[in-house]
Amino acid sequence: MANWNTLLGGHGKFTAAPLTANCRTLAELAQHACVGVSPFNSYFKRARVADLCQWALPRFERVHFHLPDVPSQYTLTALGMPADKARRRAHENGLKMRNRIRDGLFDATGREDTELCLLDWEHLRANEAFQRLYRQAQHWFTADLAFRDMCLNASRCVLAHRMPGEPTEAQVNEAVRYFLADIPLLIDTPQIAGVESSVYVYHRTTPFVEALFGNRLPWSPSPHQGYLVLCPADGGE
């Protein structure tokens, strides 16, 4: 078990903040970290991904990088890009991010076993636990108005940052397909990755994440699932 000083120390480029007391306990167990890497997000420059590898790998027994490459196409189609072009663009960007993760892992460990550390769509679509949780996410989106509204609002905010004016409801309903594919990793990564406990690591939180881990939605994370906000120490993006 790592103490909190160990988690925070040794790499001054980040500050770590657990979302809840249980999240802190799971972070201190340090059994597994799932580091989210968002395609088309300028935060994840090559140097940043390398720093994330340097931070996570010494602190946790196992580390995966969550790369939602294929689902990212739905943001592009929501913004008006033709579906074929969006698929190609998502694939190309996924390869670019995968290479950044590979290089960061090699710099941190000297190994090139990227596939063992990657949770991209190729891996997730073949994962029974992920598919079960994905179906549950779709169920709650359909069945519960509060859950649906928070998902739609999260997707609306993503689109609003990438376009002039307010997105239409049709655009939001297209973009939310990406968001729904992320939710299983927030609910129960241990089931997906085959570990006892895990923390999802990302550089910010959202109203949906706070409501989810605050048990204010009808579906709550596993008690073995945590969330850790890992921000640049200098406050930069």
Image (spheres, rainbow, N blue to C red):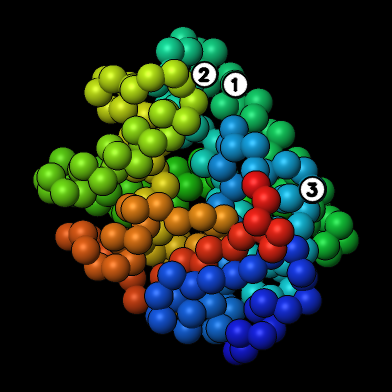
Q: What residue lies at 52% left-to-right and 67% top-to-bottom?
A: 228
> Foreground residue, 204 or 128?
204
Q: Is residue 44 left or right of residue 207?
A: right
Is residue 111 depicted above or below 158 in this figure?
below
> Does residue 149 show up?
yes
Q: Is residue 117 left or right of residue 75?
A: right
Q: Is residue 78 left or right of residue 67?
A: left
The residue furthest top is 82
Q: Are discs 1 and 2 less than 8 Å apart at CB?
A: yes
Residue named by callout 1: 89
Residue named by callout 3: 47
Q: What residue type is labelled 2?
A: Ala
> Does residue 26 show up?
no
Q: Which amino acid does label 1 sit on?
A: Arg
Q: How crowded is mark 3: few (under 14 residues within 10 Å), some or many (20 or more)?
A: few
Percent across and percent down for residue 119 are: 56, 51
Q: What residue lies at 21% left-to-right and 59% top-to-bottom?
A: 217
Is residue 1 depicted above or below 11 in this figure?
below
Q: Is mark 3 on a helix, strand or loop?
A: helix
Q: How crowded is mark 2: few (under 14 residues within 10 Å), some or many (20 or more)?
A: many
| Whole-number angstrom distance, CA of label 3 to CA of label 2 | 26 Å
Q: Which amino acid does label 3 sit on?
A: Ala
How many numbered circles are shown? Answer: 3
Q: What element carries label 2?
A: helix
Q: Earlier in the sequence, mark 3 or mark 1?
A: 3
| Whole-number angstrom distance, CA of label 3 to CA of label 1 | 22 Å
Q: Is mark 1 on a helix, strand or loop?
A: helix
Percent across and percent down for residue 16 are: 59, 70
